[in-house]
Image (tube, rainbow, N blue to C red):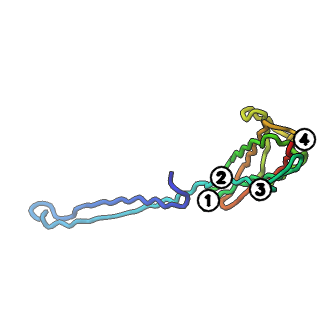
């Protein structure tokens, strides 16, 4: 796959002969024409990170997870991104802890699943105390070039 920002150039050449017909044909002239056309490649370049704070917990303590998606493309907008996350085992969802951020004109939509294959649209928050296996999936309608979007939530060690 060609990288974002690469230039692909196509070259075309034409050669023709011009001269007098008959015996004077040997007095011909060669004429050449060249043309180029360039195409700038523009495609989304998506990266994702997930961090947790703090990184060391005891039973009944709470951690905050943050998942960020960034489009590092020079010109291309990414459309209909899907971010899936299996929540950690031995942890429970903290009620009303979901927070999202997306650039202007973009929006996150949440769905959840108990098996990672059947997805149900969720209200603004998953159910309190949800334990594993539990999967979250977010879709973001668009993410412009050099833009990011993040989602964070809290989980408690059981």
Earlier along the polypeptide chain: callout 4 or callout 3?
3
87 vs 18: above or below: above
Query: Residue 4 at what x, y percent from top left?
Result: 55, 58
Dividing the picture into quadrants, the one containing residue 88 is: top right
Residue beneath label 4, please? Answer: 128
Q: Residue at x 67, y 49 (%)?
A: 79
Residue beneath label 1, please? Answer: 73
- Which is nearer the eye, 83 or 102? 83
Earlier along the polypeptide chain: callout 1 or callout 4?
1
Q: Are marks 2 and 1 in contact (CB under 8 Å)?
A: yes
Q: Nearer the viewer, mark 1 or mark 4?
A: 4
Would residue 98 be seen by someone viewing this image from the given angle? no
Earlier along the polypeptide chain: callout 4 or callout 2?
2
Residue beneath label 2, please? Answer: 78
Asked if residue 26 lies left or right of residue 63, the reply is left
65 vs 119: above or below: below
Would residue 78 be seen by someone viewing this image from the given angle? yes
Q: Are marks 2 and 3 in contact (CB under 8 Å)?
A: no
Q: Secondary structure at mark 1?
A: loop
Between the residue at mark 1 and the residue at mark 4, the CA separation in whole angstroms equals: 37 Å
* Label 3: few (<14), some (14–19) or many (≥20) C-alpha neighbours in 10 Å: some
Q: Residue at x 88, y 50 (%)?
A: 61
């Amino acid at each position: 796959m060609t990288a974002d920002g690469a230039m692909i150039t196509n070259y075309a050449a034409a050669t023709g002969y011009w001269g007098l017909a008959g015996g004077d044909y040997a007095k011909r002239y060669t004429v050449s024409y060249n043309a180029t056309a360039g195409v700038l490649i523009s495609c989304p370049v998506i990266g994702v990170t997930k961090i947790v704070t703090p990184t060391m917990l005891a039973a009944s303590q709470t951690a905050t997870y943050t998942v960020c998606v960034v489009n590092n493309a020079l010109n291309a907008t990414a459309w209909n991104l899907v971010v899936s996350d299996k929540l950690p085992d031995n942890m429970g969802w903290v009620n009303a802890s979901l927070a999202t951020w997306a650039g202007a004109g973009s929006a996150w939509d949440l769905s959840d699943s108990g098996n990672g294959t059947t997805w149900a649209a969720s209200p603004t928050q998953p159910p309190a105390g949800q334990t594993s296996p539990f999967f979250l999936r977010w879709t973001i309608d668009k993410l412009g070039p050099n833009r990011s979007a993040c989602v964070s939530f809290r989980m408690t060690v059981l």
